[in-house]
Image (cartoon, helix red, strand yellow):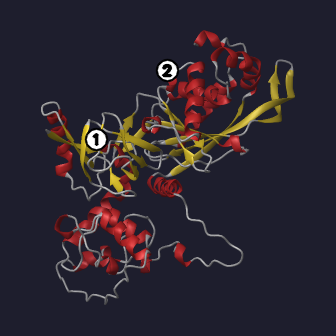
Amino acid sequence: MSVVDLILPKLGESIMEATILKWHKAVGDTIQLDETLLDIATDKVDSEIPSSTAGTITEILFEVNAVVPIGTVIARIQTSGSVAGTPSTEKIQAPATIVPVSEPIVPETIVVEEVPYTPAASNVEMQQENSNDIRFFSPLVLNIAQNEGINLNELQQVPGTGSQGRVSKKDILNYVAQKKAGHIQPAIVAQPVMHAEPTSAPAQSTNSTSSNTFPTIDHGFSTSNGAGKFANPDEVNVTGNTEIIEMDRMRKLIAKHMVESVQTSPHVTSFVEADVTNMVVWREKVKQLFEKREGTKLTFTPMFMECIATVLEQFPYINCSLQGDNIILKKDINIGMATALPSGNLIVPVIKGANQLSIVGLSKAVNSLANAARNNQLKPQDTQGGTFTVTNVGTFGSIMGTPIIPQPQVAILALGAIKKRPVVIETPSGDAILVRHMMYLSMSYDHRIVDGAMGSSFLSAVAKAFEQWDQNRQWFQYV
């Protein structure tokens, strides 16, 4: 008999944690290999987690609605095997003994999101560890506390279950939940007396913060008096005929990631106009035969994706990520496509190896992923590994947009609505005004790595590829 630890698996390049939605089994139940054990949710997708072994569940370590870091042991299963289960158990137990379960586990692949905060976080850690009056709080705990309106004095009173009494993410979230439920009344703590420390006084005069003020390591704006540059949402005056609706889980996570992206990457957006008349004419000519022969509809999206993937091969610095001072060039071209859900939220399934697919393959991939997204049937791997993202704002009538970069990518392209307009065209016999199908393309990119010249050149190359689409193309030769 042996006991195997079930680890919460890695769910994507930028996913650090997941929320447990439902356990399908209880302690004492038997479970088969690959049988669904629990449902989890991330900001990208809700998913089922299968058991990695067959046996009897001896322990469930987290309750429903718990937020669990990736790589954490979530359950233990007793198996009948002894030899076969031992290697896998030893392999997955190692990281769990290195990092406490109560602390968030940060995969190396998402360090890029944390780069802007590293220097400041180090300063805070040094200040707090060297002080006899202030406990150590991780940047994550400070961030949660500030978002919930908990000042540093109140945070000092939160009991910690981490190493040496440290307050973990679980502790602060539990405290917030208890406080909102009215079970906790925050104690009124007197302002601590400043102790004279001649050896460190000059440094503290420029780097320290008051006892009821949070360091600015997480938000990039002043937090003087615990308020900051922006008004506290709790202080917004609600008057007149209004309705207050709490954001759902996915919208909260989307909002959080959008703010983090803007704080991480200096965004620049370039625009270009493209004449897509050739694409419109060709699609209209072949779409019925295409659907009849291939069993899938031909939309503009796979046509756009084919051109974009081809141009990405010529601009490797658009298909990359930034990790500290290192540029990670991605050899695979995996294009994410922002897809609207019935709830109004967005999800980004990824077309893997887009540059290796024909127009037929791209059409089937686009339609399959879009349908799975709308029916909540996406799997975790369907949203992983994206290297570049395309969003079609024209679907909703917008002629252009300024999208926000999905970290840790460095660019996102927005496709505007196709509109008929009179355009001046150069002909051998002179200029002529013709009615053409026109659209705007816009691309937001990370100015730390992509300069205006590169961003504009890439965007112009994509527009040119659209315009040069062959109206006489025999699509079935590319199957």
Q: CA distance from mark 1 to mark 2?
A: 43 Å
Q: First in sequence, mark 1 or 2: give its number.
A: 1
Please name the residue that numbered disc 2 is placed on.
Answer: 356
Q: Which residue is mark 1?
A: 30
- Residue positioned most to the top: 477
Image quadrant for the C terminus? top right
Question: Who's the residue at 47% across and 25% down the image?
Answer: 353
Mark 2: few, some, or many residues within 10 Å (few <14, many ≥20)? Answer: some
Query: At x 19% / y 35%, what residue is drawn?
Result: 88
Q: Tell me if mark 1 has few (under 14), some (14-19) or many (20+) residues whose alpha carbon lies within 10 angstroms of its own.
A: some
Query: Where is residue 374 shown, x and y percent of the image?
Result: 59, 40
Query: Given the image, on which type of amino acid does mark 2 rest?
Result: Gln
Q: Is residue 460 left or right of residue 409?
A: right
Work out whether 325 lies above or below 479: below
Q: Nearer the viewer, residue 203 or 300?
A: 300
Q: Position of residue 287 (x, y in %)?
A: 72, 20
Q: Is residue 314 visible?
A: no
Amino acid on which the number 1 mark rests in the picture? Thr
Instruction: Give residue 275's position: percent from left, percent from top.
Output: 73, 30
Nearer to me, 54 or 455 = 54
Residue 273 tag number? none
Which residue is found at the position 60% from the left and 20% from the top? 359
Would you say 244 lies left or right of 407 here?
A: right
Location of residue 278 with respect to 106 vertically, above or below: above
Specify whether 168 is left or right of 22.
Answer: left
Q: Nearer the viewer, residue 291 or 299?
A: 291
Question: What residue sits 53% from the left and 38% below the top?
Answer: 389
Q: Quadrant of the N terminus?
A: top left
Disc 1 + disc 2, Cβ < 8 Å? no
Q: Secondary structure at mark 1?
A: strand
Pinpoint residue 134: horizontal percent, then vertical percent: 24, 77
Secondary structure under tag 2 reads helix
